[in-house]
Image (tube, helix red, strand yellow):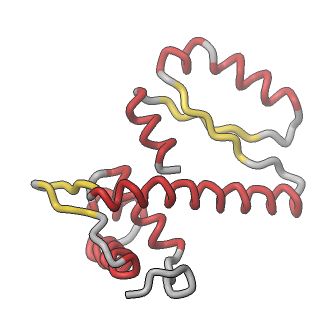
Amino acid sequence: MDNSMSQVRIRFRHLQTFLDVARQKSDSHAAKMLHVSQPAVTKTIRELEALLDTQLIEKEGRGIRIARPGEVFLRHAGASVAALRRGVDSVTLETNGRAPMVRVGALPTVSALVMPHAVELFLAETRENRIRVVTGENTVLLNQLRVG
């Protein structure tokens, strides 16, 4: 199979499904997040693997494991989805005058001590600002950052 970009027809649903499976480490949990059936998630992942001509996900007990090619693709898929979100946010800003959503990951100690005041200052800048703070352990936050 020729994997040149002119031949590969990866769709947003392929990327989003792959990222959710990687985040959840489970196709059934990803299906719940995506509001689709588990077989639909499996089919989408198989389509993506066929498009890339490589195995991205491996079964491991009752869960899954990201194969080495999947780890490589994960960095790029996350960056692609994040860039697309920024693009959509920019269009929203341009057409509606609304500021894009700022997403912040914070450790629990920072979230409790620093973030309330930081968010207050950020929101005071203009009425259009929007922010979402996600709290979690370091490994969870780094994984979310890595996958976009």
Task: Where is residue 147? Give x, y as percent.
Answer: 47, 50
Q: Is residue 72 left or right of residue 90?
A: left
Residue that lies at the very extreme toward the top in this rendered image: 113
Report whether residue 37 is seen: no
Q: Quadrant of the N terminus?
A: bottom left
Which image quarter: residue 35?
A: bottom left
- Using the image, determine if residue 48 lies above or below residue 86: below
- Using the image, determine if residue 2 lies above or below residue 122: below
Q: Is residue 83 left or right of residue 62?
A: right
Which image quarter: residue 115?
A: top right
x 50%, y 60%: residue: 77
- Using the image, determine if residue 21 lies above or below residue 44: above
- Using the image, determine if residue 127 lies above or below residue 25: above
x 88%, y 63%: residue: 95
x 51%, y 83%: residue: 9
Task: Where is residue 102? Give x, y as percent.
Answer: 69, 41
Which image quarter: residue 36?
A: bottom left
* Total numbered labels: 0
Task: Where is residue 27? Give x, y as percent.
Answer: 28, 62
x 33%, y 51%: residue: 24
Report whether residue 128 is seen: yes
Task: Where is residue 92? Give x, y as percent.
Answer: 80, 60
Residues 33 and 21: in front is 21
